[in-house]
Image (cartoon, rainbow, N blue to C red):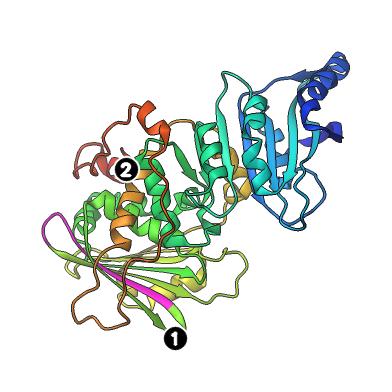
Amino acid sequence: MEPAAILPLQSPKDVSISEIQAELDKLWSTKGEHGAARASTFTLVVYEALDDRVLLPSPTVESIATQNPCRVIDLRERKSGGDDGVSAQVAAYCPIQRDKSSLVCCEYITLQAPESAFVRMCNTVASLLIPDLPTFLWWQGDLDLSSRLFQELVKLSNRIIVDSSGFVNPEEDLQEMDLLSSQGLHCGDLNWRRLAPWQELAAQAFDPIERRLALSQLEQVAIDYKVGNPCQAFMYLGWLASRLGWDPLTRQHTIEHDYPVDRFTFRDQEGRVVSAELGAVPLISESIVPGGLIGVRLLAPASQINPATVICSESTGCMRMEAKGVAQQSVTQQVSPTENQSLDSLLSYMLQRIQRDTLYEETLMMVKKMINAPQPRGGGGPPRGPPPRRPRPPPHPVQDQVNTPPRRPPPPEGGGGLWGLFFAV
């Protein structure tokens, strides 16, 4: 379905900080009588660490108006120069719906300043939030929990949204997300949502009764991803391991043919050892983002029916995985490009969720264990210790205000069927 056309009820207008709310009230007092309705279901605070540019809503932020009436407060960090001032604009955009005679519009407040200025004006940002409605923070800068600005904006928010495909320090930042979740904060990751088709195909592949035994007896897992940020690969393996009750034993990180490879061992619930490999693959295709999954291969004992399960994103990924053996005995599932993988659709999905994502939280717990698993004895490769970490801030004040339920281990195999095993929390 094509997105609705956008009508600029008020083009971006320069205002002073003290005039923002008054200017919005004035806008609606003059425009409301022409059939435009002022309505909001939430406030979206966006932090963007960008270079200087024209103060206009980004395409993704602007597209939110086609999905939900809301107020957007777009904070754009200004990097260059010694100017410590704040530039502000207000605007209003309305999606045109063919079946409706009235317009329901979104308000946009765009602020541009150095990070230090944003820290000083957090009280001003707080005054612009719509009372009694949820506030989402979409953080697009470097994930640094010691950042004063990040801490202050988190205090104002009901849910934190990130995109781990842009993490500067992937392993460290995934653990930072686990820390935020453990403090009772509600978190979401657009990159986690990108894994949904891969997760669903894994559940479908083992849904037939005759294949469920193979799932409980997996021996090897191989995951190929497009060279770049490895967060998707870590989260997919972490999701699988947490659902099946595996316990990480070792991790070996090496560089092979100039590209990183991570090898893990786990112990399953029956005491068997399961091996897993995450391999970065150079790929020219632009249809897959850097770090995006290319193929997944799950191998059970040869005595099982169709012991190999292959999930792949395109023909090259399928051929790579099937070439590793038992191609004739494999069940192959191919992930098709889907419209809901666009940045607009991913963000819109996250804005419809205010509750905790326990499945995501349990995956992050497993990923943290995987990252910090010891190197195998005599495994070769360079010595590997924990990655250097930024100073951690003290626990967030919100932790004491949230009645946080215990973080439960994955449910045992059984109740709820196979779909429940993979997705029930």
- Residue 158, given in percent of the width and then of the height, sits at 50, 31
Which residue: 25% across, 72% down? 375
Magenta-highlighted residues: 260-271
Find numbered disc 2 in the image and state the secondary structure of the residue it sits on. helix
Q: Is residue 391 left or right of residue 41?
A: left
Tell me which amino acid carries mark 1: His
Disc 2/disc 1 C-alpha distance (Å): 38 Å
Quarter of the image where the C terminus is located? top left
Tell me the chief SS of the magenta region: strand
Q: Is residue 164 visible?
A: yes
Q: Is residue 140 left or right of residue 33?
A: left
Q: Is residue 333 visible?
A: no
The crowding category of the residue bearing disc 1, from other C-alpha atoms within 10 Å (few below 14, some 14 to 19, many at least 20), is few
Q: Which residue is mark 1?
A: 257
Q: For residue 186, what is the image quadrant?
A: top left
The crowding category of the residue bearing disc 2, from other C-alpha atoms within 10 Å (few below 14, some 14 to 19, many at least 20), is some
Taking the magenta stretch, the answer to whether it contains residue 321 is no
